[in-house]
Amino acid sequence: MTLHWQWLRFGQLGLGDLYDAIALRERVFVVEQNCPYQDADGLDRCAWHLLGRDTNGTLHAVLRVVDPGRKYVEPSIGRVVTAPEVRGTGAGRALMVQGLDRCAAAWPGQGIRISAQAHLQRFYASLGFEPVGAVYLEDDIAHLEMF
């Protein structure tokens, strides 16, 4: 499946974009993973948002890149999510590559820090991330800080 990528700052997101992104995040993180959590954490306002849509305009992938100094000293990629119907197609890897490229262009030479769900450690390691510290619980899901 080919996705069309669009980068937007929070203020550039249209109402439809914002609704679609929140709906996908809730669909996966809240409903599929059965994890009620506070999605509106204040960091969306200081982030780039990447939307991956199919040719019909359906949102299948989204992430955010939080500006350095907001969550961590470094830029941070988070809220990485793909719709269940595109998993296994390479959409998740393409999403992350886009995120890594944005960070390299916006903040050359800076590292990137993430808070990854621990079961995805191998996936993020394949993109160059290394664990930092021990596994911890975030919203009752095992996470691992990676750099």
Image (cartoon, rainbow, N blue to C red):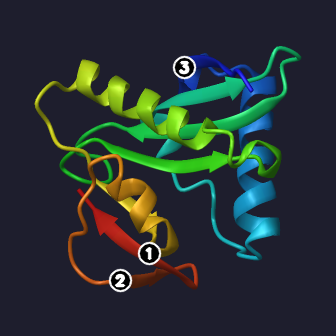
Left or right placement of residue 72 versus residue 16 in this view = left
Furthest residue in direction left, as rendered: 109
**Nearest the camera: 108 or 37?**
108
Left or right placement of residue 105 versus residue 83 in this view = left
Specify the amino acid type for callout 3.
Answer: Leu
In terms of sequence position, does the residue under pointer 2 or pointer 1 come before the other? 2
**Nearest the camera: 18 or 77?**
77
Quick one: quadrant of the C terminus?
A: bottom left
Instruction: Report the Cα–Cα distance between label 2 and label 1.
Output: 6 Å
Q: Residue at x 23, y 61 (%)?
A: 130
In terms of sequence position, does the residue under pointer 1 or pointer 3 come before the other? 3
Q: Position of residue 89 (x, y in %)?
A: 68, 40
Specify the amino acid type for callout 2.
Answer: Val
Residue 62's mark? none
CB under 8 Å between discs 2 and 1: yes
Q: Position of residue 8 (x, y in %)?
A: 54, 20
Of the residues tagged 3 and 2, which is closer to the observer? 2
Q: Position of residue 138 (x, y in %)?
A: 49, 78
Q: Which residue is mark 2?
A: 135
Q: Residue at x 35, y 33 (%)?
A: 100
- Report helix, strand or loop for mark 2: loop
In terms of sequence position, does the residue under pointer 3 or pointer 2 come before the other? 3
Q: Which residue is mark 3?
A: 8
Q: Residue at x 76, y 46 (%)?
A: 83
- Report helix, strand or loop for mark 3: strand
Compared with 46, 11 (above or below) is above
Q: Which residue is mark 1?
A: 143
- Pointer 1 local density, CA inside 10 Å: few below 14, some 14–19, many at least 20: many
CB under 8 Å between discs 3 and 2: no
Query: Which quadrant holds residue 109?
Result: top left
Compared with 101, 96 (above or below) is below
- Pointer 2 local density, CA inside 10 Å: few below 14, some 14–19, many at least 20: some
